[in-house]
Amino acid sequence: MVIEYMQKSKVNGDLLSFLADNKCGEIEFDLLRFMGQHPKAKLSFYVITQAFRIATIDLGNALMALVEKGILAHRLDGHGLVTYSLSPDEKTSAHIRELSSLDWSVAMALKKELKDRAFCYQDLWRDSKRVAGL
């Protein structure tokens, strides 16, 4: 007997717009899902690198990009330890909590959609520069 399983789940348009407007790359997307699963945590760079096991330079760039966009907050304690946490902005935090609550397959489909949109925007930007003669 074969059981066919299909999950029909739609992503909130506000969430898609939020992620697209903030140009979240793949590492940033994964970081946001991770931080959304730990919404009250203040995590050090070391802890995050242990969870992700990717090049620290790539992770550091993604963290700083999210801090600059106001999606994550960072804090330096009295001992020189920098910790990262979700932004205190309630609307931003709500988007991240929603992102982290998505089923894995839905989240991966959303990640692919964002990647496809990024390529589309790059092509449009390149074409507009060509038309403008730049």
Image (cartoon, grey):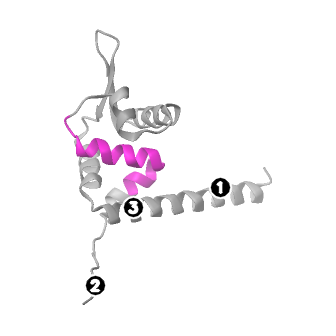
Q: Earlier in the sequence, mark 3 or mark 1?
A: 3
Where residue 1 appears, as percent x and y from the top left, is 24, 90
Q: Residues within 10 Å of mark 2 (few under 14, many from 20)?
A: few
**Does residue 66 belong to the magenta stretch?**
no
The residue that mark 3 highlights is: 108
The residue positioned farthest toward the top in the image shown: 78
Nearer the observer, disc 3 or disc 1? 3
**Camera-nearest residue between 74 and 27:** 27
Marker disc for residue 64: none
Q: Are marks 1 and 2 in contact (CB under 8 Å)?
A: no
Q: Secondary structure at mark 3?
A: helix
Where residue 123 appears, as percent x and y from the top left, is 65, 60
Image point (40%, 33%), residue name: 49
Image point (35%, 12%), residue name: 80
Marker disc for residue 125: 1
**Does residue 20 belong to the magenta stretch?**
yes
Q: Give, as a single range, the part of the protein colored magenta.
A: 17-40
Q: CA distance from mark 3 to mark 2?
A: 20 Å
Q: Is residue 23 visible?
A: no
Nearer the observer, disc 3 or disc 2? 2
Q: Residues within 10 Å of mark 3 (few under 14, many from 20)?
A: some
The residue that mark 2 highlights is: 4
Label the magenta part by its dominant secondary structure.
helix
Q: Amino acid at mark 3?
A: Met
Question: In the rendered view, does 88 fall on the left or right side of 20?
Answer: left
Where residue 87 appears, as percent x and y from the top left, is 29, 35
Image point (38%, 59%), residue name: 16
Q: Is residue 27 above or below residue 20?
A: above
Q: Amino acid at mark 2?
A: Glu
